């Protein structure tokens, strides 16, 4: 399913005309990000398919393009992104986009970045650290209450002793493991970085939505990259989703039917995945070491 049909970026003449009109000079400064990036690449209008990929080296503008599109469509995001005082002005006055008919962008659509996965993983580690600390304290409390119960130290004289009585009875009838879990919680599953990243995409994808993914391959092993690529293909083919992805990964670039924009070429053009410079670098590496792989 296609929700976003096209996105149009200003030409150099339009950027200079805007700068002259609003700032009194016709040469946008590099600090006025994102002015002055894409006109020099000859990038004007982007057409989208069910799976569209932006490919290019570091600094080629992949993430900037995704952020422009995400902010234009007001897509929710988890972590902040690099921006400037001029970013939203650039969108509002210079960029244009088309959706398909009256379909618009459905709720549940979002942009997900490698930072989202990374910070989610850090949050889980912090949460587990705090939970482990509470569990240690609760275990110590259990042992103390258990010993006091055997000694019969608590005299029940007033209502103020009621909570203590309840705890003492609970300690008598529960194992330490059950008591600690009931009062301090359970540790989150200690996934590896790759396992967490894989589960992140499995749990965040929804039917009938547009998803922007910025370098989803980060933290994923080749095996897990293959699984996420297959997941994307399934959601695009069977569950009415559209994906716009920035990536270097051969496993994403070689997805069936993906429309690829090579941001390293000037002007920017669409290419087959095997024509890309990065992919040919992989090919050259394996070709030079063909004999090491045997038959």
Image: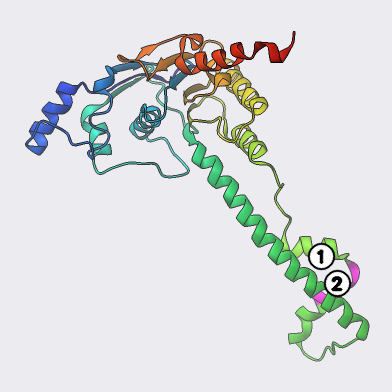
Binning the other alpha carbons within 10 Å of mark 2 as few (below 14), some (14 to 19) or many (20 upward) gives many
Q: Main secondary structure of the magenta part?
A: helix
The residue depicted at 16 percent of the width and 24 percent of the height is: 14
Q: Name the mark on residue 179.
A: 1
Where residue 109 appears, x then y in whole percent?
A: 48, 31
Describe the element under mark 2 as helix, strand or loop.
helix
**Quick check: can you spot residue 255?**
no
Q: Is residue 59 above or below residue 287?
A: below
Q: Quadrant of residue 265?
A: top left
| Tag 1 and tag 2, C-beta contact below 8 Å | yes
- Mark 1 nearby-residue class (10 Å; few <14, some 14–19, many ≥20): some
Extreme-left residue of the structure: 24
User: What x and y, as percent, mark residue 56?
Assistant: 42, 22
Label 1, label 2: how many angstroms apart (C-alpha)? 7 Å
Q: Residue furthest right?
A: 150
Q: Is residue 274 magenta?
A: no
Q: For the residue labelled by badge 1, is the local secondary structure a helix, a strand or a loop?
A: helix
Q: Quadrant of residue 137?
A: bottom right
Q: Read off the magenta span.
A: 166-173
Residue indicated by mark 2: 171
Q: Is residue 173 left or right of residue 114?
A: right
Seen from the viewer's position, the closer of residues 35 and 173 is 35
* Rendered image quadrant of residue 294: top right
**Residue 80 in view of the camera:** yes
Side of 143 relative to 127 (left or right): right
Residue 195 at x, y = what percent?
A: 67, 37
Residue 34 against residue 118 in the figure, above or below = above
Task: Please state the horizontal and vertical placement of residue 219, each as a whole percent of the image.
Answer: 59, 36
Q: Vertical placement of 184 versus 141: above or below?
A: above
> Of the residues under marks 1 and 2, which one precedes in the sequence?
2
What residue do we see at 63% from left, 52% from top? Answer: 125
The quarter of the picture where the C terminus appears is top right
């Amino acid at each position: 399913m296609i929700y976003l049909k096209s996105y149009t970026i200003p030409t150099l003449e339009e950027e200079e005309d805007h700068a002259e009109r609003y700032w009194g000079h016709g040469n946008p400064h590099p600090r006025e990000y994102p002015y002055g990036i894409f006109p020099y690449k000859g990038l004007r209008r982007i057409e989208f398919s069910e799976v569209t990929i932006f490919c290019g080296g570091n600094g080629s503008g992949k993430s900037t393009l995704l952020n422009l599109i995400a902010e234009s469509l007001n897509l929710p995001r988890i972590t902040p992104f690099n921006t400037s005082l001029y970013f939203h002005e650039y969108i509002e006055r210079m960029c244009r986009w088309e959706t398909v008919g009256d379909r618009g962008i459905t709720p549940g659509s979002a942009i997900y970045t490698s930072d989202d996965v990374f910070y989610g993983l850090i949050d889980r580690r912090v949460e587990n650290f705090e939970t482990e600390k509470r569990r240690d304290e609760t275990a110590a409390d259990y042992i103390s209450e258990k010993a006091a119960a055997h000694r019969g130290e608590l005299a029940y004289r007033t209502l103020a002793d009621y909570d203590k009585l309840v705890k003492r009875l609970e300690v008598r009838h529960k194992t330490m493991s059950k008591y600690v879990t009931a009062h301090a919680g359970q540790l989150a599953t200690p996934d590896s970085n790759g396992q967490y990243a894989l589960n992140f995409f499995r749990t965040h994808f929804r039917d009938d939505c547009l998803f922007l993914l910025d370098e989803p391959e980060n933290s994923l092993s080749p095996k897990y990259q293959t699984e996420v690529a297959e997941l994307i293909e399934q959601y695009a083919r069977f569950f009415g989703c559209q994906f716009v992805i920035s990536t270097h990964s051969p496993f994403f670039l070689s997805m069936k039917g993906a429309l690829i924009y090579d941001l390293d070429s000037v002007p920017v053009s669409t290419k087959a995945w095997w024509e890309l410079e990065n992919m040919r670098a992989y090919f050259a590496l394996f070709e030079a070491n063909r004999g090491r792989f045997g038959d």
